[in-house]
Image (cartoon, grey):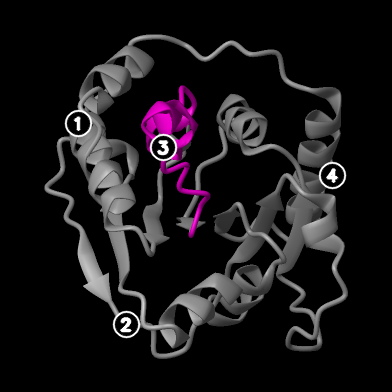
Amino acid sequence: MHTQLAALVARHAATVFQKPIANHNRHAFDFSIAAWQQAGTAPLILDAGCGVGLSSHHLARAFPSNFVIGVDQSADRIDRNLDWPHPVPENLLLVRAELSDYWRLLQMAGITLARHYVLYPNPWPKVGHLARRWHGHAVFPTALALGGRFECRSNWAVYIDECVAALRQLTGQPVVSEQFEPGSPITPFEKKYRDSGHLLWRCEADLTPARRVW
């Protein structure tokens, strides 16, 4: 793991991320929250960095009493006409926005999550990339403050080990890294990695407000 992770997490926990929020992210947020409210404000699941949205489809079908919002910064990925399961679940919305803004807008609106997924994020593997990994990013404490059942998956064990360390530092919980085998992959990357023999790793944490320490 990166030797500067603990110091970076501590600094981010003690400060407020103040990067200006882009207008297009505000518009995307307002649109998605309006759609959620129109659907009845069911418990909210966020698929953070949903890519082409297959994972969001699977989550919406797996949790029909929840509303799933899949967020990705790439309009190209979200708009690809891929052969996902049809019909599209009514409890699903995909939206193009940058997560560093979207997470903060959720917090400012006082919205809490039932479940929160970060599935196969860009690992940014170089030593100088630590602050680009989500657990090393200044917005990570804000993302965790949204509550719910948090889960991160990766094919890079170091990424999950670092995420576990950041979660432990910020929550005080005994979070662990575990290897797992998906019976039915829910993302294209998950299927690709499984089929090519990669080991897959994940960590989970209960981030309800009563379990936070910061």
| Upstream in sequence: badge 3 or badge 1 | 3
Q: Amino acid at mark 2?
A: Glu
Q: Which label is found at residue 125?
A: none
Q: Are marks 4 and 1 in contact (CB under 8 Å)?
A: no
Calculate the distance from the C-alpha at mark 4 to the C-alpha at mark 2.
Answer: 36 Å
| Front position among marks 4 and 1 | 1
Residue at the disc numbered 3:
126
The verdict on residue 96 being magenta is no
Which-is-in-front pick, marks 1 and 2? 2
Question: What is the C-alpha distance between the residues marked 4 and 1?
Answer: 34 Å
Q: Which residue is mark 2?
A: 181
Sequence-first tag of 3 and 2: 3
Count neighbours of disc 2 (C-alpha within 10 A) and say few if under 14, some if 14 to 19, many if 20 or more: few
Q: Which residue is mark 1?
A: 169
Please rate how many residues cluster around mark 1, counting C-alpha atoms within 10 Å: few if below 14, some from 14 to 19, many from 20: some
Identified by mark 4, the residue type is Phe
- Which residue appears at 84% of the width and 44% of the height? 31
The quarter of the picture where residue 36 lies is: bottom right
For residue 31, which numbered disc appears in the image? 4
- Going 34% across and 58% down the picture, which residue do you hit? 156
Left or right: 130 with respect to 27?
Answer: left
Residue mark closest to the camera, 3 vs 4: 3
Can residue 83 be seen here? The reply is: yes
Q: Which residue is drawn at the image coordinates 63% and 13% (left, top)?
A: 19
Residue 122 among those drawn in magenta: yes
Q: CA distance from mark 1 to mark 2?
A: 27 Å
Please name the amino acid that badge 3 sits on: Lys
